Image (cartoon, rainbow, N blue to C red):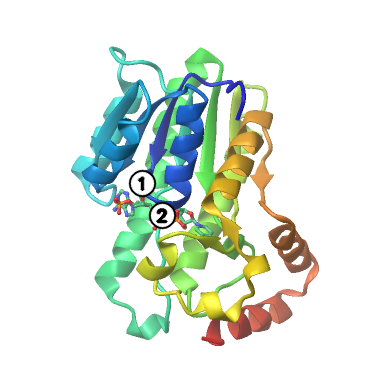
Amino acid sequence: MKKAPFSHALVTGASSGIGEAVANKLGKAGVGMVLVARRKDRLDAIAARFPSVEVLVADLTTSSGLSAVLERLGSTSLPNIELVVNNAGFGTSGPFADADPERLSREISLNINALTRISHEAVRQMLPRGRGYLLNVSSIASFQPGPDLAVYAATKAFVTSLTESLHEELRGSGIRVTALCPGLTHTEFQSISNTSGLESNFPEFAWMSADDVARDGLRAVAAGKAICVPGLVNKSLATVSTFTPRGLARRIAGLATRLR
Ligand SMILES: NC(=O)c1ccc[n+]([C@@H]2O[C@H](COP(=O)([O-])OP(=O)(O)OC[C@H]3O[C@@H](n4cnc5c(N)ncnc54)[C@H](OP(=O)(O)O)[C@@H]3O)[C@@H](O)[C@H]2O)c1
C-alpha cells in the first residue's frame, strides 16, 4: 500500500500467514505497529525489519492475554491505534462428535470472544476521535454452513454478521469497519486446522497467497468497504452461494469438505 490513512495499527495473529503479510505491508508503508500472537520469536523477526514496532506476546484465549491487548488499545501514554486488524483464528475439521471439546472452546474463545472484545474496545477508543479503521478477518465459510468444519463456519458467520452490523451502526462516525472474507489461502491454517486434504481437493487456481489477501483487505478497509471477498474465484463462489437455495448450498458444502 502506498500512502496509508492510518499511522499506527494493531494486528492479531501477526506471527504467520495473513496476519504476517498484513504486518509486512503495513511496515513497508511506514505504519507503526503492535504485533500480537503467542510466538515471540516470529514477532521479533518482523519487528527487527521495521521501525516503531511493539511486540505483544499474548494468548487471546486467556483473560490475561486478552486484557493486555485491551489495555494497549486504551493506553494514553503510547501512540493511538488507528487501525485494528482482528486476524487471529483457527479451525477444527472433522466430524463434530469426534472433536476435542476443549479445542472447540478455545476456537470459539479466539474466533468470537477475543474478536468481539477487541472490536468493542477499539470502537470505544475511536469514537471520541471521530476516526478509525477496523478490519475483521472472517472467511467465505461464513456464507453457508460448513459440514465437517461446523464450529469454524459458525464462528465466521458470527464474525461477518457482527462486522456488517458494526459497519452500518457506525456509518457517519468516521470509523470504517470491514469484514475480510478470504477463501483458500496458503498459510499454516491447513496444518493447524487439519484441512491439508483440501490442497489435493482443489486446483491451484482456487488458492490465493497470504500476500494478495492482505493487500485486498487493507485496500478495502481504507476504502470503507463493508465486505471484501478477495480473488475472482472466491467472489464467484460467494455470489453463487448468495443465490443458491440454502438446502442445496448445504449439500454442496458437505460434498466439498467430505471429499478428503
Ligand atoms: N488460510 C485460509 O485458507 C483462510 C481462509 C479464510 C479465512 N482464514 C482466516 O484467516 C485468519 C488468519 O489465518 P491464517 O490462514 O493466516 O492462519 P495461520 O497462518 O495459522 O495464522 C494464524 C495466526 O493466529 C495466531 N493465533 C492462533 N491462536 C492464537 C491465540 N490463542 N492467541 C493469539 N494468537 C493466536 C497465530 O499465532 P501464534 O500461533 O504465534 O499464536 C497466527 O499468527 C484466521 O482468522 C483464519 O480463520 C484463513
Residue indicated by mark 1:
114
Q: Which amino acid does label 1 sit on?
A: Ala
Count residues near mark 1 (Cα–Cα under 10 Å), then give few for <14, some for 14-19, many for 20+: many
x and y percentages locating residue 181 in the rendered image: 60, 53
Determine whether, in the image, residue 224 is placed left or right of residue 193. Answer: right
Looking at the image, which residue sits at the far right?
Answer: 243
Q: CA–CA distance between discs 1 and 2?
A: 7 Å
Q: Can residue 39 be seen in this view?
A: yes
What secondary structure is found at the residue carrying circle 1?
helix
Residue 188 horizontal/vertical position (percent): 40, 61
Quarter of the image containing the N terminus? Answer: top right
Q: Is residue 69 above or below residue 153?
A: above
Query: Which residue is pictured at 49% across the width and 40% down the height?
Result: 22
- Residue 66 vs 127, above or below: the answer is below
Identified at 41% across, 66% down, the residue is: 91
Is residue 173 or residue 31 the one in the foreground? 31
Residue holding disc 2 = 111
- Would the CB of label 1 be found within 8 Å of ligand 1? yes
| Kind of residue indicated by mark 2 | Asn
* Residue closest to the eye, 12 or 60: 12
Q: Which residue is drawn at 72% across and 65% down?
A: 237
> Mark 2 and mark 1 in contact (Cβ < 8 Å)?
yes
